[in-house]
Amino acid sequence: MSENKGQSVSKPQWEWQDCYLEAFLDTNPLNLVGRIAAAEKAILLRTEELRTSSGGEAERQALADALSGLSILKK
């Protein structure tokens, strides 16, 4: 087991968050465009899935916030 020096990294609540976090945490600028594109695709696919379901307001808000964050990252 590796030592995490007191830092706790929790598993994302929703699957699409993995791609979103990868875009934000990747420090290699050569990967940024691809990471952002993958995150946007995952977010948009999940948004489409939620269109046909009831509830999910917290996730819908998280999706909107994530898209906003990615738009800032692209600048």
Image: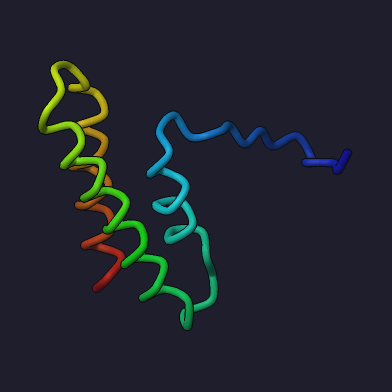
Quadrant in the rendering for residue 6: top right
Q: Quadrant of residue 39?
A: bottom left
Front residue of this view, candidates 52 and 13 = 52
Q: Position of residue 54 (x, y in %)?
A: 13, 17
Residue appearing at x 28%, y 58% in the figure: 41
User: Measuring 41% from the left and 67% from the top, which residue is drawn there?
Assistant: 35
Residue 27: image quadrant is bottom right
Task: Tell which residue pokes out farthest to the top in this image.
Answer: 55
Q: Of residues 16 and 27, which is closer to you in this image?
A: 16
Looking at the image, residue 50 lies above or below residue 16: above
- Colouring scheme, one of rainbow, by chain, secondary structure, one colour: rainbow
Judge from the rendering whether residue 51 lies leftward or rightward of residue 66; answer left or right.
Answer: left
Numbered circles on residues, count: 0
Vertically, is 4 above or below 21?
above
User: Viewer-proximal residue, 19 or 46?
Assistant: 46
* Residue furthest out toward the bottom: 30
Q: Residue 3, how many percent across, how many down?
A: 85, 41
Which quarter of the image is occupied by the N terminus?
top right
Q: How far across and how far down the image is residue 26, in percent?
A: 52, 65
Q: Is residue 31 left or right of residue 51?
A: right
- Residue 19, horizontal then vertical, whole percent: 43, 53
Comparing 59 with 6, the one in front is: 59
Whether 61 is drawn above or below 4: the answer is above
Q: Residue at x 24, y 73 (%)?
A: 75
- Residue under the point 27% across and 48% down: 43
